[in-house]
């Protein structure tokens, strides 16, 4: 599938959407508005192409194993890249993990998947979650971003079609 690209010139960021999940749909325009909002909260955002990849669980797990030597399921994988090459980074999210977690947490699927995108973006702007203190800072920033999205009603319109038996 060819990636879909949206430009955010005021942020010096070009968004490239790669939907590799056969049942996921969304509006490019709403997803762009979502990213413009969260990006506006941070100075020093990476410039260039930001690739957003929506994946099925199996493919996401293989990627996790291949690059991080960990084959356990995860929700989001972020790859920082070289801004000198015109790349802002890549955020790969597991759509199936988001669906499963949204059911367990009793929240809308689109909110859970949006949280994964926020989490990935925060990694690209310098936050980490390896140590307890850093993890708490990152959680606080996630909540700050979610508050903005909630207040502005800028949720992406992610829709996951039912699986066919």
Image: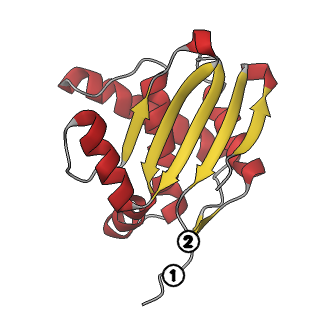
Q: Quadrant of residue 135?
A: top left
Residue 151 visible at all: yes
Name the spot of residue 120 as percent of width and height, x first: 45, 35
Q: Secondary structure at mark 1?
A: loop
Name the spot of residue 64 as percent of width and height, x first: 29, 43
**Residue at image coords 73%, 51%:** 28
Labels 2 and 1 touching (C-beta < 8 A): yes
Which of 121 and 136 lies nearest the eye of the viewer?
A: 121
Local packing at callout 1 (Cα closer than 10 Å; few below 14, some 14-19, many 20+) is: few
Q: How many marks?
A: 2
Whether 115 is drawn above or below 95: the answer is above
Q: Which residue is mark 1?
A: 162
Q: Is residue 122 left or right of residue 22?
A: left
Name the spot of residue 149 as percent of width and height, x first: 61, 43
Q: Which residue is mark 2?
A: 23
As drawn, which residue projects farthest toward the bottom?
Answer: 165
Which of 34 and 14 lies nearest the eye of the viewer?
A: 14
Which of 97 and 55 lies nearest the eye of the viewer?
A: 55
Which of 123 and 19 lies nearest the eye of the viewer?
A: 19
Which image quarter is the C terminus in? bottom left
Q: CA distance from mark 2 to mark 1?
A: 7 Å
Q: How is the image coloured?
A: secondary structure
Residue 144 visible at all: no
Name the spot of residue 116 as percent of width and height, x first: 44, 45
Q: Is residue 122 left or right of residue 161?
A: left
**Residue at image coords 66%, 25%:** 40
Local packing at callout 2 (Cα closer than 10 Å; few below 14, some 14-19, many 20+) is: some
**Residue at image coords 58%, 19%:** 42
Instruction: Tell which circle, 2 or 1, labels the residue nearer the N-terminal end.
Output: 2
Q: Secondary structure at mark 2?
A: loop
**Residue at image coords 36%, 34%:** 139
């Amino acid at each position: 599938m060819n990636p879909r690209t949206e430009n955010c010139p005021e942020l010096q960021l070009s968004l490239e959407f790669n939907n590799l999940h056969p049942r996921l749909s969304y509006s490019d325009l709403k997803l762009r508005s979502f990213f413009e909002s969260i990006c506006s909260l941070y100075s020093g955002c990476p410039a260039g192409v930001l690739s957003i990849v929506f994946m099925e669980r199996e493919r996401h797990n293989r990627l996790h194993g291949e690059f991080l030597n960990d084959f356990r399921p995860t929700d989001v994988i972020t790859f920082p890249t070289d801004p000198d090459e015109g790349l802002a980074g890549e955020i790969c999210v597991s759509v199936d993990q988001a669906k499963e977690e949204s059911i367990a947490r009793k929240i809308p699927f689109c909110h859970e998947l949006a949280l994964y995108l926020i989490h990935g973006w925060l990694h690209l702007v310098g936050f980490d979650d390896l140590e307890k203190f850093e993890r708490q800072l990152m959680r606080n920033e996630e909540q700050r971003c979610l508050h903005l999205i909630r207040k502005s009603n800028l949720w992406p319109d992610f829709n996951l079609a039912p699986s066919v038996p």
